[in-house]
């Protein structure tokens, strides 16, 4: 099978499952409880195909991060498990940070870290008065996702290849998805919030998994 075929076939299946999850969520259908985690499972399986070996430290970190994402997906379907779901995704961000870690550079600090810090500060300002007892957990979560995104950006600045660009783009979409979720939950209800959150989230995870596949090709 060509590289194009290897990319297109799973992309179509994952996109179909993601669309089913989004539609089911809009209609409050029970199918949502199937397709929401199923889409992540499919992304995990695709990521597994990209592993070179069990010594692939960065790849293993991404796969374990995806597994914690699956746990978070499942927990967030139940409102009372929100904090547990948040914790699961916090672990995901830490694992992705490990996978993308590339150190620190002047260019990265100025052009990536600084805008991310400003963005995180604005998000905290918007949410702070509404967070109640979740102030510290949410602040730690924001720090984790910003650091993950920054390290993915540093890796792209270092390698300048398609795989690292996809990973960086994925982390940016992940940050956007989490921002939409937080704004909708704590600040103000957004129209079609779940659809926006899921579409950006699945796109983020797919790009990150795809970046694994393209590293050696």
Image (cartoon, rainbow, N blue to C red):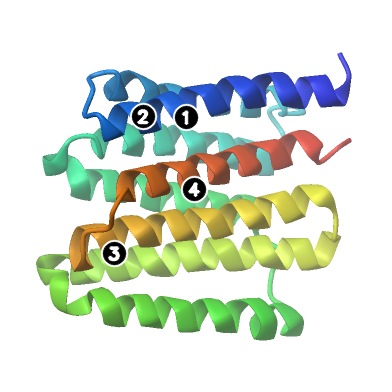
Mark 3: few/some/many CA within 10 Å (<14, 14-19, 20+): some
Q: Is residue 86 left or right of residue 205?
A: left
Q: Mark 2 near mark 3, Cβ–Cβ under 8 Å?
A: no
CA distance separating discs 1 and 4: 10 Å
CA distance separating discs 4 and 2: 15 Å
Up the image or down, 122 lies above or below 201; here it is below
x and y, in percent, of residue 197 in the image: 39, 48
First in sequence: mark 2 or mark 1? Answer: 1
CA distance separating discs 4 and 3: 15 Å
Quadrant of the rendered image containing residue 85: top left
Q: Nearer the viewer, residue 29 or 216?
A: 29
First in sequence: mark 1 or mark 4? Answer: 1
x and y, in percent, of residue 179 in the image: 38, 62
- Of tags 2 and 3, the one toward the viewer is 2
First in sequence: mark 2 or mark 3? Answer: 2
Q: Which mark is residue 200?
A: 4
Up the image or down, 9 lies above or below 154; here it is above
* Residue indicated by mark 2: 23
First in sequence: mark 4 or mark 3? Answer: 3
x and y, in percent, of residue 211 in the image: 72, 42
First in sequence: mark 1 or mark 3? Answer: 1
- Of tags 2 and 1, the one toward the viewer is 2
Label 3 residue SS = helix
Q: Is residue 115 left or right of residue 19?
A: right
* Residue indicated by mark 3: 183
Q: Which mark is residue 161?
A: none
First in sequence: mark 4 or mark 2? Answer: 2
Label 1 residue SS = helix
């Amino acid at each position: 099978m060509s590289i194009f075929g290897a990319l297109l076939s799973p992309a179509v299946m994952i996109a179909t499952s993601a669309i089913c999850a989004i539609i089911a969520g809009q209609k409050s259908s029970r199918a949502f409880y199937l397709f929401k985690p199923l889409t992540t499972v499919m992304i995990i399986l695709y990521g597994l195909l990209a592993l070179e070996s069990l010594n692939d430290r960065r790849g293993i970190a991404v796969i374990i991060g995806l597994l914690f994402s699956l746990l978070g997906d499942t927990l967030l379907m139940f409102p009372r498990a929100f904090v547990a779901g948040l914790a699961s995704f916090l672990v995901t961000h830490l694992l992705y940070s490990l996978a993308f870690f590339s150190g620190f550079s002047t260019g990265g600090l100025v052009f990536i870290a600084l805008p991310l810090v400003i963005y995180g500060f604005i998000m905290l300002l918007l949410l702070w008065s509404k967070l109640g007892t979740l102030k510290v957990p949410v602040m730690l979560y924001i720090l984790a996702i910003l650091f993950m995104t920054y390290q993915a950006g540093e890796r792209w600045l270092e390698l300048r290849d398609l795989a690292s660009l996809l990973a960086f783009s994925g982390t940016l979409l992940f940050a956007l998805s989490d921002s939409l979720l937080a704004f909708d939950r704590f600040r103000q209800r957004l129209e079609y919030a779940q659809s926006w959150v899921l579409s950006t989230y699945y796109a983020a995870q797919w790009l990150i998994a795809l970046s694994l596949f393209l590293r050696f090709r």
